[in-house]
Image: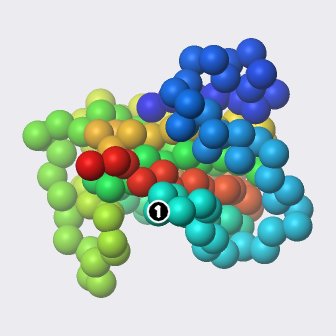
């Protein structure tokens, strides 16, 4: 997991690979006020953008999840969101969700899970080996608007 802030993007950009920096540049320059909630293809490499506004929920009501084919970049546009995160381990037990959701493995819990609260301008990058529990409330429930960039992992 990597935590970043677009207010410091010009200082931090050199730390990232060219491909990842291009994806983050896209997020940092996109006019989200003009984009409705929905799913949008980005480029031709299988990357797509999800823009969503929703109420945060109690931590205990959200299932931790992991993806194998995508890296997630969560970028907070408005409100705040607490996200649980942990590295995957053999001690994490998958739970079956019906109907199944493509490229999602859900878990009962996550060993050594930590919490991170994101505010507008901040982003978190979750690798395929990271478990994350999104859409959670911090001290109070509120609406959060978020851009979620799903970056396909090369074979």
Q: Position of residue 133 (x, y in %)?
A: 44, 50
Tell me the quarter of the picture where residue 60 sits. Answer: bottom left
Q: Tell me: 93 left or right of 148.
A: left
* Mark 1 surroundings within 10 Å by alpha-carbon count, few (fewer than 14), some (14 through 19), many (20 or more): few
Residue at 64% across / 28% down in the picture? 4
Considering only vertical position in the picture, is 52 above or below 22? below
Image point 43% across, 47% down: which residue?
71
| Quadrant including the N terminus | top left
Say whether residue 81 is left or right of residue 97: right
Seen at 32% across and 64% down, the residue is 103
Colouring method of the image: rainbow
Q: Quadrant of residue 102?
A: bottom left
Q: As drawn, which residue projects farthest toward the front? A: 44
Name which quarter of the figure residue 34 lies in: bottom right
Left or right of 79? Residue 130 is left
Residue topped by disc 1 = 46
Q: Position of residue 109 (x, y in %)?
A: 28, 49
154 left or right of 12 in image? left
Residue found farthest to the left: 90
Q: Is residue 134 above or below residue 22?
A: below
Do we see residue 99 in this rendering? yes
The foreground one among 82 and 53 is 53
Q: What residue is rendered at 74% in x and 26% in y? A: 9
- In this rendering, does residue 141 appear at all? no
């Amino acid at each position: 997991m990597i935590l970043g802030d677009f207010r410091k993007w010009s200082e931090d950009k050199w730390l990232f690979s060219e491909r990842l920096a291009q994806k983050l540049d896209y997020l940092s320059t996109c006019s989200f006020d003009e984009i409705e909630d929905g799913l949008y293809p980005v480029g031709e490499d299988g990357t797509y953008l999800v823009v969503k506004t929703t109420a945060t929920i109690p931590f205990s009501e959200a299932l931790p999840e992991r993806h194998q084919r995508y890296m997630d970049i969560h970028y907070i546009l408005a409100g705040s969101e607490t996200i649980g995160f942990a590295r995957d381990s053999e001690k994490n037990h998958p739970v079956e969700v019906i109907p199944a959701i493509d490229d999602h493995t859900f878990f009962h819990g996550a060993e050594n899970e930590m919490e991170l609260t994101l505010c507008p301008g901040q982003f978190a990058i979750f690798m395929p080996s990271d478990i994350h529990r999104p859409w959670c409330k911090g001290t109070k429930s509120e609406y959060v608007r978020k851009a979620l960039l799903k970056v396909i992992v090369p074979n």
